[in-house]
Amino acid sequence: MIRADMHTHSEFSGDSKAPAEGQVKAAIESGLSWYTFTDHLDLYMPLCEQEDGSIGNAFILDIPAYTKEVARIRDKYKDKISVFTGIELGLLDKAFPDYRRILNETPFDFVLGSIHTVADMDPYFPEYWKKYPGKKGVILYFETMLDCIESFSDFDSLAHLDYIIRYCQDEKENPVLRDYEYSVFGEIIDEVLKWVIKNDKALEVNTAGFKYGLDRPNPSLQVLKRYRELGGERITIGSDGHKKEHLFYDFDKTEELLISLGFKYYEVFKKRKPVSIRLGE
Ligand SMILES: [Zn+2]
Ligand SMILES: [Zn+2]
């Protein structure tokens, strides 16, 4: 059984209402040994309408309040589970100086690197696909990812590599490319995977893909297979759960898949240092 969820959200993220302590209680009940909070920080994300109708950025993290609350929970449940303070950074050129400063000032256990903004837009919204429909939008996303990681590498695991596929649309707003062949984006994904391996990062296996009806994690099995072929071994596993019922989503299925692809270990992080745990135990 996979005993660590390395990608989780709580009410400290603008898109979650889940109390942080409730998330950890759910993890304890499910028999997890490690729980890592990775709430969102996306500086300079394009502004959009908030729940209260105002315009703003929902992905600003109150770091002092967050780290204080995680420390309190870690202490309270220390006999039952190991709780870690991570962060999910939305990688974006103009945010890199701020991120460098923040990571210097705050002793996080784990940093996820994610691409949530492409060409000043959030690909979650249809406006992105109106401008860059289908394949065009996906390629632009991977190009942006490569540019970002080449200029900012202070993260531990590259998150949800092909999650953009969930939202991909053509000009007429029809979902497209949900089940893409590796070769369609192979050239650019190869470059990203080689960068991950060369720079000694982990690749995240994000199980939210199952929840979104893709019937697979992100990245796809073909991408994970290619990562192995290229020599990639290091992975972290995360549910990206924003509610307690979405934590450790389909971890059983994921473990079988990873073993069948030849992965032997997954990693957890403490003070930015990886610890390997054997799959299937
Ligand atoms: Zn994300
Ligand atoms: Zn996330």
Image: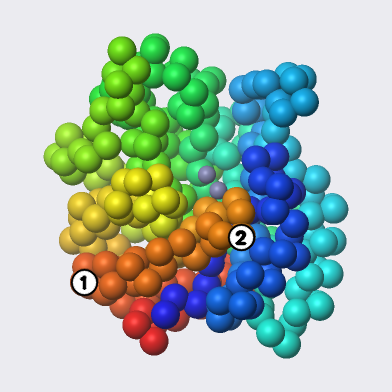
On the image, which quarter does residue 25 sit in? Answer: bottom right
Graded by Cα atoms within 10 Å as few (under 14), some (14 to 19) or many (20 or more), the crowding at tag 1 reads few
Residue situated in front as seen by the camera: 253 or 265:
253
In this rendering, the answer to whether 148 lies above or below 78 is: above
**Residue 202 appearing in the image:** no
Q: Which numbered dot is residue 260?
A: 1
Would residue 118 appear left or right of 198 to someone viewing this image? Answer: right
- The single residue placed furthest to the front in the displayed view is 245
- Please give the label number shown on residue 244: 2
In the depicted structure, whether residue 251 falls above or below residue 16: below
Number of numbered discs? 2
Quadrant of the image occupied by residue 77: bottom right
For the C terminus, the image quarter is bottom left
The residue lying at 23 percent from left, 63 percent from top is 228
The three-letter amino acid code for the residue at tag 1 is: Ser
Q: CA distance from mark 1 to mark 2?
A: 28 Å
Question: Can the viewer see residue 91 in this picture?
Answer: yes
Crowd band around label 2 with a 10 angstrom C-alpha radius: few (<14), some (14–19), many (20+)? many
Q: Secondary structure at mark 1?
A: helix
Amino acid type at circle 2 is Lys
Asked whether mark 2 and ligand 2 are closer than 8 Å, the reply comes as no
- Residue in view at x 61 percent, y 72 percent: 27
Q: Is residue 152 left or right of residue 75?
A: left
